[in-house]
Image (spheres, rainbow, N blue to C red):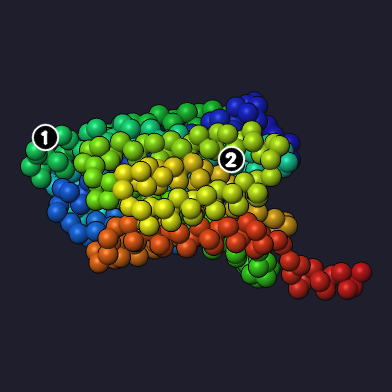
Amino acid sequence: MKRKSTLSHQQSLWLISLVPFIWGMLTATTNLLVPYLQDVYSLTYTQSIWVQVIFSSTPILASLPTAVLIGRVGFKPSMLLALGLSAIGCAMVLMAGSYASYGLTLFAIAVIAMAVTALQVVANPIIAEIGPESGTSQRLTFSSTVNALGVTLAPMLAAGFLFREYEQSTAEQANNLLIPFLALAATIILISIALARLPITYPATPNSPQNQNQTKSRLIKHRHFWFGVLAIFCYTGTEVSTGTYLISYLSHAGGMSFAEASRFIAMYWGGAMLGRLVGTFLFLKVSARKTLIFNALLAACFTLTAIMLPGRTSGLLLVALGLCHSIMYPVIFSLAVKKLGGDMAKATGILVMAGCGGAVLPFVQALLADTFFIADTFWLTFSCYLVIASFAIKGYQPKPCEEEAMLKEAV
């Protein structure tokens, strides 16, 4: 398709990658709210994890409606609407803080989560279409790097406002949300204006609902894709769980204060950013699949050490999991969609929905944490790494679906 944009592919990629930057900042800041709100409102693990459950379960509800919206109004209007919704969600968090209301905060987080889901569903196909097909995986890895930059910056900027070294009342602590979320809202508005005005060519409107239903009937026969969905589920679950419970582990098993432990969150997400940046160039010479196998097995070893030998050193190994996680999503994604052809669009939506692992697994770990020592709850994380490694070793291999087999017989 001939592109009418006056911007080059590279310029368009940089601009659209600001969208993953935004949802990265929103995601990391939400993760930081779990221990923060637990302290402010004196919540149990199970009560506080509802922040993450709401945030990460929203893809189940919002992914397909976003796809319908894109089909009706196109990619650009859908993206701008999602950005606007995320700014509204940030404003609602400020309102919740002024009323010191945990319930209202949860509702605001649900609004932000819907916006983040919509941004993911809209942005990934745009990034895939910006340049030649041969560079799709590299572009997705680059956008993941920009996403990781947002994820890294958010805790660095927000932690100092949320976790104070001096005593505060509940109302004062709740109002600590003001500056971080006001800054997020301002950033979103500025980026939205830039994307609305600059000449970027967006993909054509997706297929009709009738064609989408036909795609679903074919997609279900690709077993390697569904193994990839499970791997994405496990990846998002382990990444969110580790980021969520890292402060608790460093505090209870490592003997750190909450303020000291919170500083390591930036290192955790920074490792993810560094690994994705290296992966953008590394994959030109090294097999992405073999890198995924190595990272998954190394992460399993780090987690096993944290379980068997809990302490400060093991906690730092958990911080290093960010580096192990860095390339997992783009590699799992690229392996899962191999040989799907026209099923790619529907597959992308389902893979985004698989992000609900970030809600299910942290909630299960919260239930375990209320009963067992925090280190023991990481057996769940260890199991997920084994699933990811299995997918990279064997489960990624595409197998001919029934339609393909019948076609070969006919030929």
Query: x and y percent of residue 125 in the render?
Result: 60, 46
Q: Name the residue at the front extreme.
A: 309
Residue occupying image coordinates x 84% and y 70%: 407
Amino acid beneath label 1: Tyr
Between tags 2 and 1, which lies in front? Answer: 1
Query: Is 11 situated above or below 124?
Result: above
Q: What label sits on residue 70 in the rendered view?
A: none
**Which of the image's four quarters has the N terminus?**
top right
**Which of the image's four quarters has the C terminus?**
bottom right
Q: Mark 2 falls on what kind of element? A: helix
Where is mark 1, residue-wise?
A: 166
Q: Is residue 343 visible?
A: no
Query: x and y percent of residue 130 in the render?
Result: 64, 37
Taking 166 as reference, is 219 left or right? Answer: right
Where is mark 2, residue-wise?
A: 141
Judging depth in this view, the residue of 45 and 22 nearest the camera is 45
Judging depth in this view, the residue of 393 and 145 nearest the camera is 393
Disc 2 versus disc 1: distance between alpha carbons?
Answer: 41 Å
Residue occupying image coordinates x 51% and y 45%: 324
Judging depth in this view, the residue of 98 and 296 nearest the camera is 296
Query: Is 373 situated above or below 409?
Result: above
Please tell me which of labels 2 and 1 falls first in the chain. 2
Q: Name the residue at the right extreme.
A: 411
Taking 146 as reference, is 204 left or right? Answer: right
Residue occupying image coordinates x 41% and y 45%: 317
Query: x and y percent of residue 264 in the render?
Result: 34, 38
Q: How many other residues sit within 10 Å of disc 2, few (<14), some (14-19) or many (≥20)?
A: many
Amino acid beneath label 2: Thr
Q: Quadrant of residue 138?
A: top right
Q: Mark 1 falls on what kind of element? A: loop
